[in-house]
Amino acid sequence: MEELIGTPKLRALKEVIISNDNLIISKARKTFSQIDLSFKDVFLQQNTKTTLALINELAFDGTFLDIFSSTPAGLISTIIDENAVVQVCWQNKDLLQNAKQSMFFNLGNNIIAKVNVYADGLHINKYELKSLITWHAKRNHLFVIPAI
């Protein structure tokens, strides 16, 4: 899995098998010690269920739009469902080493989920896809997308 994806902005690290559960972020207290309150008002219309996710390490600096659009199948192929977010985080807590490193998920509808680890566990917050923040590769940020 050393091959770079896309332009190349992402380097594949690990595949994660996702079981067919119906977990949602706002109720995943077993996985997240802190959940951004705005997730309770998010009603994501997801027509597909993610069965296999790919955890990627950021290889080059970029904004969310730059990074998620750099995948071979384009931006729309990076949308992942809430069930997959909860399961990837639960199964891979050990991949996040400090609060400066983040794991990102494109939930569609202009919503990005950002996960960080702190002393009390995983925290999940909501960002907008169109945010102009530049994410730096030197921080080893992780971007999770459905495997195609």
Image (tube, grey):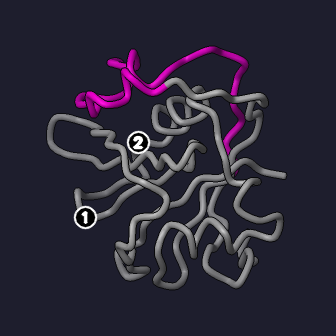
Quadrant the N terminus occupies: bottom right
Q: Hey, what amino acid is under mark 1?
A: Lys
- The residue that mark 2 highlights is 93
Residue 131: which numbered mark, if any?
A: none
Residue denoted by label 1: 100
Instruction: Kindly identify the residue that appears in the image at 69 percent across and 45 percent down.
Output: 53
Classed neighbour count for the residue bearing mark 2: other residues with Cα under 10 Å, few (<14), some (14–19), many (≥20):
some
Say which residue appears at 77% left-offset and 33% top-offset: 51
Q: Quadrant of residue 39?
A: top left
At horizontal 24% and vertical 36% (from top left) the residue drawn is 121
**Relative to 101, residue 120 above or below:** above
Q: Secondary structure at mark 1?
A: loop
Mark nearer the N terminus (1 vs 2) = 2
Of residue 12 and residue 77, the one placed in the foreground of this image is 77
Of 136 and 92, which appears nearest the observer? 136
Instruction: Specify whether residue 40 is painted magenta.
Output: yes
Residue 105 is inside the magenta segment: no
Q: Nearer the viewer, residue 58 or 24?
A: 24
Residue 44 in picture, x, y percent from top left: 57, 28
Dot 2 amino acid type: Lys
Could you say where residue 31 lies in the image, as x and y percent from the top left? 38, 26
Q: CA distance from mark 1 to mark 2?
A: 14 Å
Q: Is residue 24 depicted above or below 105 in this figure?
A: above
Q: In this picture, is 82 found above or below 40? A: below
What range is drawn magenta here?
15-42
Image spot of residue 67 (x, y percent): 58, 72
Instruction: Find numbered disc 2 in the image and state the secondary structure of the residue it sits on.
Output: helix
